[in-house]
Image: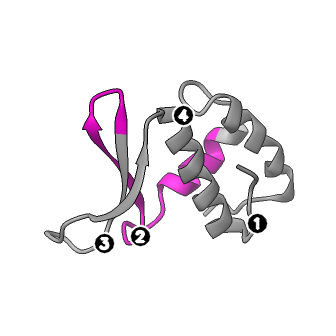
Amino acid sequence: MYKIQPDDRKVVEEFRRNPIGRHSPQLQRVLNLFRGAPMEGKYVLITRIPHKEWVLGQMTGKRGEPIRMTNQVFHNIEEVEWYVFRQRWKLHTGEDLEE
């Protein structure tokens, strides 16, 4: 399984500038790692108002159990994608990224 390398730090700004769409192979490798994590604790976006409002939830990892909803509401898809990227980066590296 791929692990974050020191050189992967350079993809952080790439993702921040362009969280949705095509990515470099190096960034895609990092995203595949993040998105392939176990279901328990995995972040999911729930659309409350299409294209306008999203709520962050977390999977329990147990079939049939409801998603744990958070109080975090976002009004910009790029903002919520950046938030989730930062949370996953910290989980894999222990490093906090600037907002």
Amino acid under disc 3: Gly
Element type at marker 1? loop
- List the residue tagged with mark 2: 41
The label nearer to you, 3 versus 1, is 1
For this orientation, the residue located farthest to the right is 7
Front in this rendered view, residue 85 or 92: 85
In percent of the image, x 29 and y 40: which residue is there? 47
Q: Name the kind of residue labelled 4 in the image.
A: Glu
Front tag of 1 and 4: 4
Decide: few, some or many residues near mark 3? Use Cα within 10 Å; few <14, some 14-19, many ≥20.
some
In the image, 53: left or right of 31? left
Up-down relation of residue 22 to residue 68 (above or below): above
Neighbours of disc 1 within 10 Å: few (<14), some (14-19), many (20+): few
Distance (Cα) linking label 1 and label 4: 21 Å
What span is in magenta?
28-53
Label 3 SS: loop
Mark with earlier residue (1, 4): 4
The quarter of the displayed image where residue 64 is located = bottom left
Disc 1 residue type? Glu
| Most foreground residue, 56 or 90 | 56
Mark 4, residue position: 78
Q: Disc 3 marks which residue?
A: 61
Query: Which numbered disc, 3 or 4, marks the residue that appears first in the sequence?
Result: 3
Residue 68 quadrant? bottom left
Residue 25 pos. (x, y %): 68, 35
In the picture of the structure, the residue carrying the numbered disc 1 is 95
Q: Position of residue 19 (x, y in %)?
A: 59, 34
Query: What amino acid is labelled 2 in the image?
Result: Gly
